[in-house]
Image (spheres, rainbow, N blue to C red):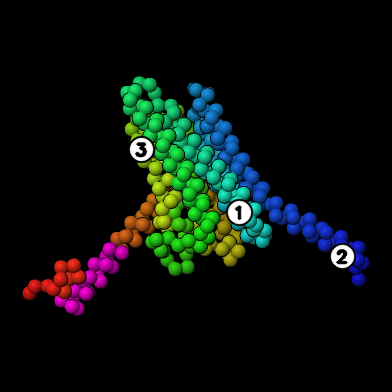
Amino acid sequence: MPTRDAVAARAQTQARLRRGMFLLPSLFTVGNIAAGYFSITQAIAAIASGSDAHTHLDWAAIAILFAIPFDALDGRIARMTNTVSEFGKELDSLSDAVTFGVAPSLLAYVWGFHFLPATIRPDLRQELISAGGFICFVYLIGGVARLARFNISPDAQPRNPGRPGRKYFVGMPIPAAAGLIASTVHFFGGAYPNQAWWVALIWLALVGACGFLMVSTWRFWSGKEINFARSHPMQILLVLAVALFLMVRFSEGVLFTGALLYMFSGIWARAAYSWSWRRRKRLRESQHTAETGTDSLAGPLRP
């Protein structure tokens, strides 16, 4: 029989271990916000560095991309270790606002508009810079609003429901929007920041689309129905190894393509649902007309 002191010591050890387990998800959240802070400092350094701006902006983009797996792991680890807490949820939300809200909006502004050359018409250049500052602010507001809606609606349903049994995000998640901006900058990381007025117009549309998609109620695949515990570990390791190799070896093209495909998957899902809904509506109207001999809009049909 263990003595009373041994039982008390064991209970104390388990309590310390339990407290340590609560710290584990928060460490990943701290890594998330550290990457966001580093990205902000690199974007500011790009403004002051001049000729070396492209290097700083590339590092700012890479830091945001590194933060995405940190953000994905902290919640999963908290659920796996049964250490979910209100403090962890609030810390994660605030870190996302900095890393995927403030940092990408600053990066988008500096890369897309700050370095427009003086050779462009002065009035056009000023209009583009002003519009860029406003759109980047819209992106930030959209991201913060997306986080606030997620916090108060843990089981929100998209306006265009998908397949039963699948879980979806309502609106584009803010890490995906930040990943699209960061992967675009990283894709052009070997070049200087944007200096073409027509690229600035495309950049306005892309950043604005990210802001809109985050506050939309369109469905985006979440992947939460994937259960790694029920899958074959060797297959998962093989897939992860191949994906990691591709992302390291061809990071610019792979990350940029993946981010674009994810954005357009949500747009396509909304368009397909709208087309299907209109088709079903026309079918119901035609059936109603065939059964009653009347048009729901025009009244009785004339022979």
Task: Residue under label 3, please give it.
Answer: 202
Mark 3, secondary structure of its residue: helix
Are the residues tagged 1 and 2 within 8 Å (C-beta)? no
Disc 1 crowd, CA 10 A, few/some/many (<14, 14-19, 20+): some
Q: Which of 103 and 50 is in front in this view?
A: 103
Three-letter amino acid code at disc 1? Lys
The residue positioned 45% from the left and 39% from the top of the image is 137
* The residue stretch that appears in magenta: 277-293
Q: In which quarter of the image is the C terminus?
A: bottom left
Q: Nearer the viewer, residue 150 or 64?
A: 150
Mark 1, secondary structure of its residue: helix
Q: Which tag, 3 or 1, sits closer to the chain's start? A: 1
Is residue 159 among the parts visible in the rendering? Answer: yes
Farthest residue, direction left? 303
Residue 7: assigned label: 2
Residue 89: assigned label: 1
Up/down of 286 relative to 116, above or below: below
Q: Quadrant of the N terminus?
A: bottom right
Residue 176 colored in magenta in the image: no
Relative placement, left or right, of 301 versus 162 is: left
Q: How far apart are marks 1 and 2 (CA)?
A: 34 Å
Please tell me whether mark 3 or mark 1 is closer to you in this view: 1
Q: How far apart are marks 3 and 1 (CA)?
A: 35 Å
Disc 2 crowd, CA 10 A, few/some/many (<14, 14-19, 20+): few
Q: How far apart are marks 3 and 2 (CA)?
A: 67 Å
- Quarter of the view holding residue 97: top right
Q: Which tag, 3 or 2, sits closer to the chain's start? A: 2
Q: Nearer the viewer, residue 68 or 145?
A: 145
Image coordinates for residue 192, horizontal then vertical, percent: 45, 28
Mark 2, secondary structure of its residue: helix
Three-letter amino acid code at disc 3? Ile
